[in-house]
Image: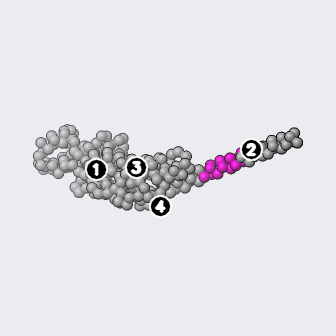
């Protein structure tokens, strides 16, 4: 009896092992399929939310990348790291190429995320469009010459028309982009803004004042302007993003200056 039973137990053991292996293969295949589906669905959902939030055209290109394996993140209810990029984004008077990095993004919109950062790169043309909203400012002459923004105009002095070039240092203050004159060029001579004030008195005062334009009012209140600098051929603005933008209507609405 024992000699007959042993082969049968070995046979049943082999079948059980085969079943387990088949189940594992099926589970692995399903996991791969689910991950591939998630790789399609999650970025598309994030993109749709961004387009709706910023009121962009439905067909506007928005690239979304989610780091790591998605299934564990979906089970946990939080996306660890999300990168969003889009060129030629226009919101109100503000436009540029946008890159945002978000951490701890919740799947459900009933709680805050961990926040993140964003960068907007503005070309000279986009900067001219933004600065054209400043009354009396020669926005059409704007160029970029790191670390400054440059502008040119003309002044009337003793019946003569004299070209004046200005170098303006960009900075951020309370949601505004601020341009502060640091030097000027008159008749090919470059002098500081203070020297211009001393030599020409009140004649140039309107041109030598700080000029500012509100950026915060064009963007969700969750974005706080932190930095502005000229890098190569672009004006680069940096923002902090409050993670509460996921669920707080007040942070989703435009800010104020």
The residue tagged 2 is 17
Q: Which residue is mark 4?
A: 58
SS at circle 1: strand
Instruction: Name the quadrant of the N terminus.
Output: top right
Label 1 close to label 3 by CB (< 8 Å): no
The residue lying toward the viewer, choosing from 75 and 245, is: 75
| Magenta-colored stretch includes residue 22 | yes
Q: CA distance from mark 1 to mark 4?
A: 29 Å
Q: Is residue 33 left or right of residue 81?
A: right
Give the x, y percent position of residue 115.
Answer: 40, 49
Question: Residue at point 25% right, 47% down?
Answer: 179
The label on residue 177 is 1
Residue 244, given in percent of the width and then of the height, sits at: 38, 54
Q: Which residues are magenta?
A: 21-34
- Find out whether the residues at labels 4 and 2 contact each other: C-beta distance under 8 Å: no
Please tell me the numbered disc located at residue 115: 3
């Amino acid at each position: 009896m024992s000699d007959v039973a042993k082969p049968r137990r070995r046979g049943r053991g082999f079948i059980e092992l085969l079943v387990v292996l088949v189940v594992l293969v099926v589970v692995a295949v399903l996991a791969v399929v689910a991950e591939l589906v998630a790789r399609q669905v999650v970025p598309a959902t994030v993109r749709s939310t961004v387009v709706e939030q910023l009121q962009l055209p439905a067909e506007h290109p928005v690239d979304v990348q989610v780091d790591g394996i998605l299934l564990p993140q979906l089970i946990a209810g939080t996306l660890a790291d999300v990168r969003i990029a889009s060129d030629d984004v226009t919101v109100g008077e503000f436009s540029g190429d946008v890159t945002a990095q978000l951490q701890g993004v919740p799947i459900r919109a009933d709680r805050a995320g961990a926040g993140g950062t964003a960068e907007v790169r503005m070309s000279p043309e986009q900067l001219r469009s933004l600065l054209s909203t400043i009354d009396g400012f020669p926005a059409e002459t704007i160029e970029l010459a790191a670390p400054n923004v440059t502008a040119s105009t003309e002044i009337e002095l003793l019946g003569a028309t004299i070209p004046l070039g200005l170098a303006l240092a960009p900075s951020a203050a309370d949601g505004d982009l601020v341009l502060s004159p640091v030097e000027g060029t008159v008749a090919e001579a470059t002098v500081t803004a203070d020297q211009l004030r001393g030599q020409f008195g009140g004649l140039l005062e309107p041109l030598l004042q700080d000029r500012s334009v509100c950026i915060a009012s064009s963007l969700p209140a969750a974005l706080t302007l932190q930095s502005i600098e000229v890098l190569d051929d672009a004006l680069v603005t940096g923002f902090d993003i409050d993670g509460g933008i996921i669920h707080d209507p007040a942070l989703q609405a435009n800010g104020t200056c």
